[in-house]
Amino acid sequence: MLQEVVAHTVYVRDELNKPALDDRVLAVIGKVPRHEFVPIELKSYAYANVPLPIGYGKTISQPFIVALMTDLLDVQPHDTVLEIGTGLGYQAAILAELAAKVYSIEIVDELAALARKRLTRLGYTNVEMCVNDGYHGWAERAPFDKLMVTAAPDLIPPPLINQLKAGGKMVIPAGLSDSQQLMLVEKDEAGRVSTKEILAVRFTSLEHDDQPQVS
């Protein structure tokens, strides 16, 4: 799988404007057992460089995309990270290997329960989860050094920008289903926000209600 991730990075290096991904990220991709985070009937495909369905209309992202988004986020050992869209917990496990604390929100109760079991069994004690509407973030735990969104809203949600610390970064796919872009959002020390398009992508849409839910 790692070889495929590296090869894919080389293939799109001109778009990424970088020749390779961070060695720390690649090491974690090689360490975390992806087969623990896919449905049992798909375990034979766990290490293929493809997204896989996990039920409820959701997917586990392609390993290259997981690696790229993690690389862009530049997670440091002292960071507190918010993830929107836990799924079965694979990306949360990747982030937990790199960060001090990971908060993760999943809107589907059943997926959240399955993710908790997997993360607990594998010893990821620095991940805290809730079932909620990720569009609104997690105000009670904010602000965050880094923020990752694994489903695509049409536009970047203002609550997520507000919950990002000065000097922080967010990686998020955004746009309509046929025109999504992976975006890097950065907030400078003065609180000014900049966005950069990284790569055309296709993610499931970010589900959200009109009103924030109670965590």
Image (tube, rainbow, N blue to C red):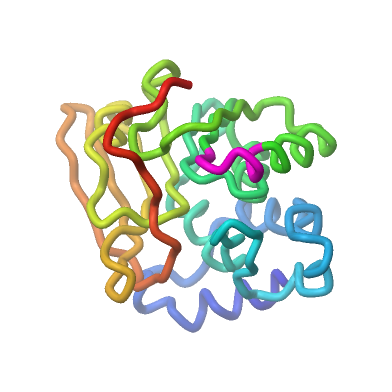
Q: Position of residue 208 (x, y in %)?
A: 36, 43
Q: Position of residue 152 (x, y in %)?
A: 37, 57
Quarter holding the N terminus?
A: bottom right
Residue under the image location 47 percent in, 52 percent down: 150
Could you tell me which residue is drawn at 57 percent across and 44 percent down?
A: 86
User: What range is drawn magenta here?
Assistant: 106-112
Residue lying at the far bottom of the rendered structure: 11
Say above or below: 78 vs 57.
Answer: above
Residue 50 occupies quadrant: bottom right
Q: Nearer the viewer, residue 73 or 59?
A: 59
Left or right? Give the position of 93 relative to 10: right
As drawn, is 195 to the left or to the right of 92? left
Residue 125, image quadrant: top right
Query: Residue at left 83%, top 62%?
Result: 40
Magenta region includes residue 108 = yes
Residue at the top extreme of this rendering: 140
Tell me the residue at 67%/43% (across/down). Answer: 93
